[in-house]
Image: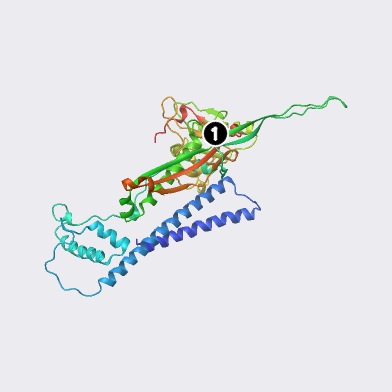
């Protein structure tokens, strides 16, 4: 499939997704609602995320097509006249010669050097003849230079900021190193009046506050000026994108598991005062876990007096949930389109992270930064049930910069990325239930 066909397919998929999102919004309008349900919000966010990925890929393919067309135009301008047949010609890029294949590749692609273009094309014609010998090393293959697809480089894989994106996020206030929120620790009281004209109940309110530090998440990479200037691709952009991806992973890890010491955040899983639900079992079963999930929800209902809005678990745990069968070998978690009967849960489209389905009326999100090394055997994960709207996250604008000044003596450049963040999970600790125990040892498939 060529690049144009790929773009057409991507645009068709984008239109399909957009139509589905429009239908979702139309349903909200038809129902005379002003907000999406949690499940609808998960579907909408997943669709918007896929549209952004499609737009980025279409832009990338379009840029590649433009570069291909520009190279073809250069070739037409300088190689359109017939040339005499050359029966004997020195190798263009021979050992010890003054011409470099990769330097010419850089000059042709980035500088539009017509001489470099002509040498590359002449070398291609010679290599084509040499390939009649062999492309195997030792039989002529050394004369065939490798093709480097710089634009299609393979990025390092990292999990995304799934849980962090479920939390209401505000801009970080400037000029502070901590955020403090007043809190009513005990309230007033009322009581029936014993008799007319007698004293009424008077109980004084007490207050306290909760505080969250402003922490810095940062990373950098020092690179040679030669790499920055001579690379045919934007290497500093590649490094900054990689730093941004790891910032998202680190922020999400802090939101979940930050210890709250040494310049770190206090995470939702390490917060004191949350509802601890223990699931102990040597032979874990989905039915037992289902009961624990109900208990985690009940703890929030009876202590926060408002419902939770999300279940967050590791992708391996959700895969284990999907794999469980009833006594007749029927799956207990089935697709929404399957017309489930007596099912424990429903699953949406298969996803490595993000919204994956629902259980007990709550959307389930898979987050690969959920810890999996807990417990005495360091082989247990946890499941978090929470009212994510009770949590607060503050972020400033991410700074991405490149500095050459202090590294000039080494012809080096520092590329760095950093941001200031603060997270407060402790407004209502009773809004978070954490399920853990031997029943959540690493699943086996």
Q: Nearer the viewer, residue 134 or 25?
A: 134
Percent x, y of residue 133: 14, 59
Q: Which residue is mark 1?
A: 293
**Residue 387 appears in which quarter of the rendering?**
top right
Q: Find the residue positioned furthest to the bottom.
A: 81
Task: Say above or below: 218 vs 1.
Answer: above
Q: Quadrant for the C terminus, please.
A: top left
Helix, strand or loop status at disc 1? helix
Question: Residue 214 location, x and y as percent?
Answer: 53, 37
For image coordinates 31% across by 61% down, the residue present is 109
Work out whether 135 lies above or below 38: below
Residue, x 33% and y 50% (percent of image)?
225
- Which residue is pictured at 20% across the width and 59% down the height? 99
Res. 243 in view: yes
351 displayed left or right of 133 = right
Colouring scheme, one of rainbow, by chain, secondary structure, one colour: rainbow
Q: Which of the two residues, 78 or 331, is positioned nearer the viewer here?
A: 78
Give how far across and how far down residue 139 sits, in percent: 13, 54
* Horizontal side, residue 365 vs residue 240: left or right: right
Q: Is residue 316 left or right of residue 40?
A: left
Q: Look at the image and tell me in which quarter the N terminus lies.
A: bottom left
In-image side of 52 versus 95 (left or right): right
Local packing at callout 1 (Cα closer than 10 Å; few below 14, some 14-19, many 20+) is many
> What residue occupies the far left of the structure in this picture?
88
Do we see residue 343 in this rendering?
Answer: no
């Amino acid at each position: 499939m060529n690049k144009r066909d790929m773009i057409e397919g991507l645009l068709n998929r984008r239109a399909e997704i957009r139509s589905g999102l429009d239908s979702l919004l139309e349903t909200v309008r038809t129902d005379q609602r002003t907000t999406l349900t949690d499940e609808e919000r998960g579907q909408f966010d997943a669709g918007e995320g896929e549209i952004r990925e499609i737009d980025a890929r279409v832009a990338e393919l379009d840029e590649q097509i433009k570069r291909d067309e520009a190279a073809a135009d250069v070739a037409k301008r300088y190689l359109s006249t017939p040339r005499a047949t050359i029966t004997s010609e020195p190798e263009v890029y021979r050992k010890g010669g003054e011409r470099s294949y990769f330097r010419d590749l850089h000059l042709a692609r980035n500088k539009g050097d017509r001489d470099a273009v002509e040498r590359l094309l002449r070398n291609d014609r010679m290599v084509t003849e040499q390939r009649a010998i062999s492309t195997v090393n030792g039989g002529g293959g050394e004369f065939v230079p490798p093709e480097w697809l710089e634009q299609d480089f393979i990025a390092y894989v990292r999990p995304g900021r799934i849980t962090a994106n479920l939390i209401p996020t505000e801009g970080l206030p400037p000029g502070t190193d901590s955020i403090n929120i007043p809190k009513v620790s005990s309230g007033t009281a009322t009581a029936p009046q014993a008799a007319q004209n007698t004293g009424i109940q008077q109980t004084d309110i007490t207050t306290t506050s909760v505080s969250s530090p402003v922490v810095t998440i940062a990373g950098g990479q020092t690179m040679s000026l030669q790499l920055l200037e001579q690379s045919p691709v934007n290497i500093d952009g590649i490094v900054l994108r990689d730093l941004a991806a790891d910032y998202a992973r680190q922020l999400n890890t802090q939101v979940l598991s930050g210890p709250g010491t040494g310049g770190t955040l206090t995470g939702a899983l390490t917060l004191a005062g949350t509802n601890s639900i223990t699931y102990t079992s040597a032979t874990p079963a989905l039915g037992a876990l289902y009961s624990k999930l109900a208990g985690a929800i009940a703890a929030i209902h009876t202590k926060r007096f408002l419902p939770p809005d999300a279940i967050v678990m590791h992708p391996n745990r959700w895969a284990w949930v999907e794999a469980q069968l009833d006594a007749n070998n029927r799956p207990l978690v089935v697709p929404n389109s399957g017309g489930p009967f007596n099912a424990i849960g429903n699953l949406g489209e298969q996803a490595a992270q993000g919204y994956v389905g629902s259980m007990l009326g709550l959307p389930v999100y898979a987050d690969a930064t959920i810890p999996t090394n807990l417990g005495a055997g360091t082989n247990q994960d946890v499941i978090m049930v929470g009212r994510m709207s009770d949590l607060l996250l503050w972020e400033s604008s991410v700074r991405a910069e490149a500095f050459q000044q202090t590294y000039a003596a080494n012809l080096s450049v520092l590329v760095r990325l950093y941001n200031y963040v603060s997270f407060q999970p402790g407004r209502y600790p009773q809004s978070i239930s954490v399920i853990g125990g031997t029943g959540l040892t690493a699943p086996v498939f």
